[in-house]
Image (cartoon, grey):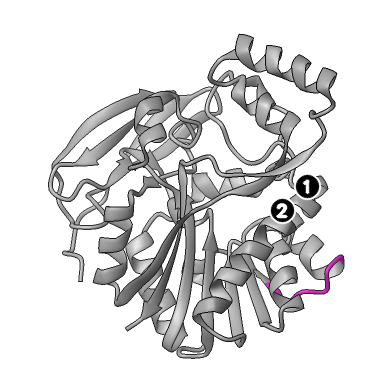
Amino acid sequence: MMPETTIKEKALRTKEGQQRLEIVPCNLCGAEDATRLYRIDGFQIVRCRKCGLIYVNPRLVREEVEKIYSQSEYFHNPKFYQFDGYMYGYAEYISERQEIERSFEKVVQRLQVLTSPGHLFDIGCGPGYFLEVARRHGWEVTGMEISEAAVRYARHRLGLDVVQGSFEEQVLPPISFDAGVLLDVIEHFHDPFSALQKVHALLRPGGVVTIATPNAGSLLARLLGGRWEDMRRVKEHLYLFSEKTLTLMLQKTGFRVLKVHQYGRHFKVGKILRRWEFYHKGTARFLQSASRLLGFYDKTYYIVPFTKMIVFAEKV
């Protein structure tokens, strides 16, 4: 169990106005001894000197962060490619359903190597694409999502059982699921340690949790440093795990890691090159022109960025 710690509040004046911040200890070991790595848009990213966990500190309080997720443009952010401040949300999610569901097929296939279809819950399920894929593979599915627009899409367009609200506030029957899924979610939690404890309580013995998250320990992430896209999402990516720190947190919350893979996704070449403008605009635009000329711009490929991991762990 993580030691009891104290959270202190302060205020920050930003272009959005006065926002509440909180100063927090390490969520993995409870230490209050961290070194600053980067300062991005007024927020500092630190690394715990004791266990190595990377996190934003001070950070926005939960109510402030949830305002970001409730924005109607979170899953369709017209400012995504402007790169003029902190990043958030998705450039386009709804229209990329085909590519995203093809990517989730790989995740479900890997999950079913480890366990048979049963009752699955997806935390932060967005518009429900993973749930839809899992349902096609024979799973009984339940989802949880903060965004009202995403919940409405999942319920009315896909006919899925999705509850609106934050996972921390949901009350679900314990020992009632065979699998839990957190895809690009755990880094958003204010208290991932407690969230994993809750996941553990919901799973039946031998149940499997699937976690996809940016890998701060990857070579490319370390080379990019403060320019790394996932590092710049300082208002919503509150924690950045390495394989070592995520494994340790899973072990402390009652899980045993079964498999760790690189996490990729199907992308159109043009979308990848648009995002590469964030790192080197000249090269990205040259490659965009070349890919259009050669007929590759609208082609879709499964791309592994080597900066994300997917971890499968079993409830012990």
* Mark 2 and mark 1: Cα distance apart in space: 6 Å
Q: Amino acid at mark 1?
A: Glu
Q: Residue 187: x percent and y percent? A: 44, 51
Give the numbered dot on residue 239: none
Q: Is residue 91 left or right of 208 when viewed as pictured?
A: right
Residue found at x 44% / y 25%: 13
Secondary structure, magenta segment, majority class: loop
Residue found at x 40% / y 54%: 190
Q: Amino acid at mark 2?
A: Ile
Label 2 with label 1: CB-CB less than 8 Å: yes
Q: Is residue 80 above or below residue 203?
A: above
Q: Which residues are magenta?
A: 157-162
Front position in the image: 168 or 249: 249
Residue found at x 40% / y 83%: 201
Q: Is residue 29 above or below residue 19?
A: below
Quarter containing the C terminus? bottom left
Question: In the rendered image, which quarter is residue 16 located in?
Answer: top right
